[in-house]
Image (tube, rainbow, N blue to C red):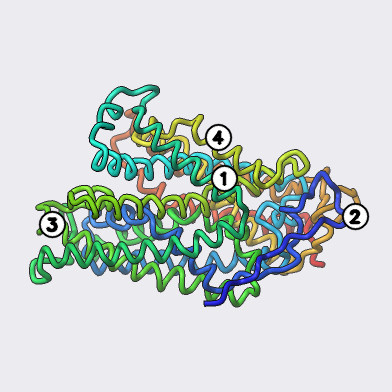
Amino acid sequence: MSEPTASIAQAPPPSYDPRLTNEDLAPLKKQSWSSYNIFAFWMSDVHSVGGYVTAGSLFALGLASWQVLFALLAGIVIVNVFCNLVAKPSQVTGVPYPVINRAVFGVLGANIPAIVRGSIAIAWYGVQTYLASQALIIVFLKFWPATAALNEPTFLGLSVLGYICYAILWVAQAAVFWRGMNAIRRFVDFAGPAVYVVMVVLAVYLVSQAGWENISLDLSQGESLGFAESIPVMLSAIALVVSYFSGPMLNFGDFSRYGRSFQAVKTGNFLGLPINFLFFSILTVITASATVPVFGELITDPIHTVERIDTPFAILLGGLTFVIATVGINIVANFISPAFDFSNVSPQKISWRTGGMIAAVGSVVLTPWNWYGNPDAIHYTLGLLGALIGPLFGILIAGYYICARQRVAVDDLFTMDQSGRYWFSKGYNPNAIWATVASGGPAIASVLVPKMLLDLGVTTTDMTWIANYSWFIGCGLGYVAMIALERRSPRITAV
């Protein structure tokens, strides 16, 4: 495989307003990422502890193995289609997600989706770093038993050893990020396949220990569901898969802008999503199935699986691999996004690197180890922010494909001139703002209200399942509201 040449940012033209421009936000002079680079990006995004646990957790819904695989595949095909939609505008123009939003929200209004997406990324950056640190703690305890003394006393909810491992990963991720996008691409190109190798080795080892004849691929837990009963559960599982990838899907333009062609991006998406995810899911099912005869219980967390093997080499290899996997997904999903998002707010004061470091520091301030274990905290904080991802996606797609007819005046994305195409009204497109309110309200309500009513004892009917569809509710309403408002009072005109 040939080494692709670096994608090159260009110095912004003098005509570009410095209040909207720096080298990181300006259109790329050269786009060189191949299909493999996009494929590797998705491998890093899929091959994580979170992805493994998400896939394994579907069995707790009472679904048979074939139904789980169907739900996983159906969900990822939907993600593939939507990723292609959001990829095109950034690939064609060579600009990142917050900048392409200027064509829909206005040159200043684009900060609204940028700040929302950046805030979500900060929270999940901390969570993923914390999860990876747990794998590193296992390595420390196995090879340096004396460190167990550091794992007991806690300060602000985390032990000294926890802080040490968190700090190691925090610095490692920052070091990779600080070296720039091409260093990140090289890391991702390595991380995705490396995790695959270890996943295959883990699966082969467990199957050999259990014996293939002792492995049952039917891992459904709880009461077995009939076909009619399983349909709504499968739909919820499909929605869960889409929601899991909704963050990277929204700002995928941050990566598709580097693609050498839109066709290369689409090919990379196809290999990295349906094909890769299906194989990953099968590996997950086989590995989880083998834990039952080997350990006497179903284990859906790969870190716990490696810990139970209890051989030094397995713990070292598995622990470091899952650390690499989590670092990979963290950088691509939760580091690069806020880097562009916060830089977009004040390009001259906040560079791409500074934006990323704001996210990294913010993740520590949130002390994710405290609220990650609290389902209510996650539901009411990330649930609220996550509910806005669907509306922002629907509005962008409607604005670019329907209202602008896939045409963007790139130079106008970087001007504060009131005659500029994307100045709209004082830098904001009121239609996009109102569409966000009209679709964001119901999406947020679908997440918060059912659980709030249940928690307050107002009702005993559990309607929290509605939250599974918050992305689809928000996306559909945002798409419809944006088109309706633009037809009533057109602001976006085709170039």
Do tag 4 and tag 1 residues touch (Cβ < 8 Å)? Answer: no
Q: CA distance from mark 2 to mark 1?
A: 36 Å
Which residue is identified by label 4?
Answer: 361
Which residue is identified by label 2?
Answer: 15
- Is residue 387 toward the left or the right of residue 399 in the image? left
Is residue 452 among what the camera can see? no
Q: CA distance from mark 3 to mark 2?
A: 65 Å
In-front residue for pair 371/317: 317
Q: Quadrant of the C terminus?
A: bottom right
- Is residue 45 toward the left or the right of residue 295 in the image? right
Residue 288 x/y as whole percent: 21, 59
Do tag 1 and tag 3 residues touch (Cβ < 8 Å)? Answer: no
Helix, strand or loop at mark 1: helix
Q: On the image, which quarter does residue 347 sit in?
A: top right
The amino acid type of the residue labelled 1 equals: Gly
Residue 269 x/y as whole percent: 51, 70
Residue 24 x/y as whole percent: 72, 53
Which residue is identified by label 3?
Answer: 292
Q: Could you tell which of marks 4 and 1 lies nearer the N-terminus?
A: 4
In percent of the image, x 53 and y 40: which residue is there? 122
Q: CA distance from mark 3 to mark 4?
A: 41 Å
